[in-house]
Image (cartoon, rainbow, N blue to C red):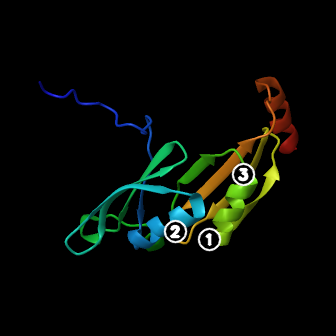
Amino acid sequence: MTEKVKRIPDGFHTITPHIVVKEASKAIEFYQRALGAEVVMVSMTPSNKVMHATLKIGDSMLMLNDEFPEWNIFSPQSSPGSTVTLHLSVENVDAFFERAVAAGCTVAMPLANQFWGARYGIVKDPFGHTWSMATRIENVSPEELEKRTKASFT
């Protein structure tokens, strides 16, 4: 009897970020320290570059690999920068933010309670990627959110 193929692997959601980093092995170690990532798998090339890695952060997966200039694959450090922000929804944003900064992330936006009902902040990791993180602190109705949004831009 043949085994049925699971179309979406365990732990994956409809969208999974896949990032390119310089020195991916160092990035993996960093994400373990800074974000509590667990290594699911790593596949190396014969030249000892990370061809593909999957990490688990909370209940979500993050895929990453080294730069491969010969295939026109570059990290934000080798190009003008990243236009993507990876967002983390966590139970205790203060502890998560503090751990990321202690591990070497730089603060791009300090943690603060925001009008949309979240405690929110942004850090940039040493590999050029931007991470926003938040903990919901208040349920805000769509009507109240619209009112607060308008007030914050006036």
In contact (CB < 8 Å): disc 3 and disc 1: no
- On the picture, is 121 further left or further right than 11? right
Q: Amino acid at mark 1?
A: Ala
Residue 144: x and y, percent? Answer: 84, 28
Tell me the SS state at disc 3.
helix
Q: Quadrant of residue 91?
A: top right
Count residues near mark 1 (Cα–Cα under 10 Å), then give few for <14, some for 14-19, many for 20+. Answer: some
Residue at mark 1 to residue at mark 2: CA–CA distance: 7 Å
Query: Is the N terminus in the top left, top right, bottom left or bottom right quadrant?
Result: top left
Give the residue pinned by disc 1: 103
Indicate which disc, 1 or 2, sits on the residue closer to the N terminus.
2
**Is residue 83 shown above or below 27?**
above
Q: What residue did someone put label 2 on?
A: 30
Relative to residue 141, is residue 22 depicted above or below?
below
| Residue 64 position (above or below residue 119) | below
Find out whether the residues at labels 1 and 2 contact each other: C-beta distance under 8 Å: yes
- Across and down, in percent, residue 38 comes to 47, 55
Q: Is residue 122 above or below residue 10?
A: below
User: How would you rate the neighbour count of disc 3 (Cα within 10 Å): few for under 14, some for 14-19, many for 20 or more?
Assistant: many
Q: Nearer the viewer, residue 84 or 89?
A: 89
The tag earlier along the polypeptide, 3 or 1, is 3
Estimate the x, y position of residue 22 in percent, counting from the top left: 41, 72
- Residue 56 bears which disc, if any? none
Q: Amino acid at mark 3?
A: Val
Residue 45, position in %: x, y?
23, 68
Q: Residue at x 44, y 36 (%)?
A: 13
The residue located at (19%, 71%) in the rendering is 46
Q: CA distance from mark 3 to mark 2?
A: 18 Å
Q: Nearer the viewer, residue 51 or 57?
A: 57
Q: Residue at x 33, y 64 (%)?
A: 73
Q: Report the amino acid beneath label 2.
A: Phe
The residue at which mark 3 appears reads as 93
